[in-house]
Image: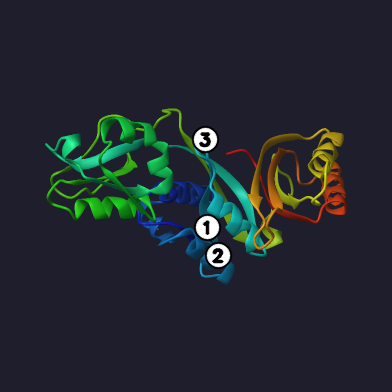
């Protein structure tokens, strides 16, 4: 089985992909099987690979406990037809500063990393490295590569504590620099085809667009409450090319195989402009 992830190897997405590979394999997974996790440059490429059939599945982060939903991936999952989240994995995040040994923080002029990692460490960067320029990269792995290319020691990176194969002279900071140490990211395993949805689940993930009138969101929430279903999260995103309209992404504790959930989704479709099932899975 081939699982796409945001590369390069060693990223948190790579760790999540390996965990998904374990859960998808019928037998044990050896180190030689890790090449079944295929790195891509960005999240659009990850989902495009799943849609085209180049890979069997994709591992994408959908929410971080500090930064909330990953907006780009919410929009991508919504926009690509036929893709569904079928598994969830929750990964603890331990962000560290990677820098050249012996260099003082005040001497570092650039910090490279993915936007999510930079945001998660904003407090540390503001306090300890206020004059360093923050350089956003497509992944923490790419940021690490950029930093290690600078032999002067004036560049650093933010990456996971698990990183390996650092260039000689570069070290991993001894402590987490996340603003919140109890930091977790929720990953979803994405597959193409409704047939891959589980017959039963602990959670259902869907989106809905309410009519643009007073009380329409309340009506949507009332339908969910009517069936005694507990929402675990709700997040809004602007509807593309329709200023003023918003799409609500909703996750709820419920079983996709139950009659109550099927009736709830039918009722939501009847009372909203759009409703799309995005996935069903067990708690990670």
Residue at the disc numbered 1:
58
Measured from the top left, where is residue 20 in percent x and y?
Answer: 51, 49
To which residue does mark 3 refer?
A: 65
Quadrant in the picture for residue 80:
bottom right
Residue in the picture at 82% in, 34% down: 225
Q: Residues within 10 Å of mark 3 (few under 14, many from 20)?
A: some
Q: Mark 2 points at which residue?
A: 50
> What whole-number distance in Å separates the C-alpha atoms at marks 2 and 1?
6 Å
Would residue 28 be seen by someone viewing this image from the given angle? Answer: no
Ranked by sequence position, the earlier of labels 3 and 1 is 1
Is residue 229 among the parts visible in the rendering? yes
Mark 2 and 1 residues: CB-CB less than 8 Å, in contact?
Answer: yes
Q: Categorize mark 1 by other alpha carbons within 10 Å: few (<14), some (14-19), many (20+).
A: many
Q: For numbered disc 3, what is the local secondary structure? A: loop
Q: Mark 2 vs mark 1: which is more N-terminal?
A: 2
Left or right placement of residue 257 versus residue 23 in this view: right
As drawn, the label of residue 7 is: none
């Amino acid at each position: 089985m081939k699982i796409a992830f945001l590369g390069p190897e060693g990223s948190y997405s790579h760790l999540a992909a390996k965990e998904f590979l374990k859960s998808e394999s019928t037998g044990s997974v050896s180190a030689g099987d890790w090449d079944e996790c295929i790195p891509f440059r960005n999240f659009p490429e990850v989902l495009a690979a799943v849609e085209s059939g180049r890979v069997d599945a994709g591992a994408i982060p959908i929410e971080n406990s500090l930064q909330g939903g990953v907006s780009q991936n919410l929009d991508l999952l919504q926009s690509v037809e036929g893709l569904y989240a079928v598994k969830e994995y929750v990964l603890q995040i331990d962000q560290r500063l990677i820098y050249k040994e012996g260099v003082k923080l005040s001497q570092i002029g650039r910090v490279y990393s993915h936007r999510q990692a930079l945001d998660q460490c904003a407090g540390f960067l503001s306090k300890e490295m206020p004059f360093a320029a923050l350089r956003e990269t497509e992944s923490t792995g790419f940021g690490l590569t950029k930093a290690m290319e600078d032999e002067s020691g004036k560049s650093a990176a933010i990456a996971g504590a698990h990183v390996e194969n650092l260039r000689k002279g570069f070290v991993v900071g001894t402590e987490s620099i996340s603003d919140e140490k109890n930091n977790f990211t929720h990953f979803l395993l994405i597959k193409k085809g409704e047939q891959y949805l589980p017959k039963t689940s602990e959670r259902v993930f869907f989106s809905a667009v309410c009519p643009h009138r007073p009380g329409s969101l309340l009506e949507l929430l009332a339908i969910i409450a009517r069936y005694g279903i507990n929402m675990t999260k709700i997040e809004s995103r602007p509807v593309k090319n329709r200023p003023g309209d918003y799409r609500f992404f909703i996750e709820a504790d419920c079983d996709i195989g139950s009659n109550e959930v099927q009736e709830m989704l039918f009722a939501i479709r009847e009372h909203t402009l759009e409703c799309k099932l995005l996935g069903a899975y067990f708690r990670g």
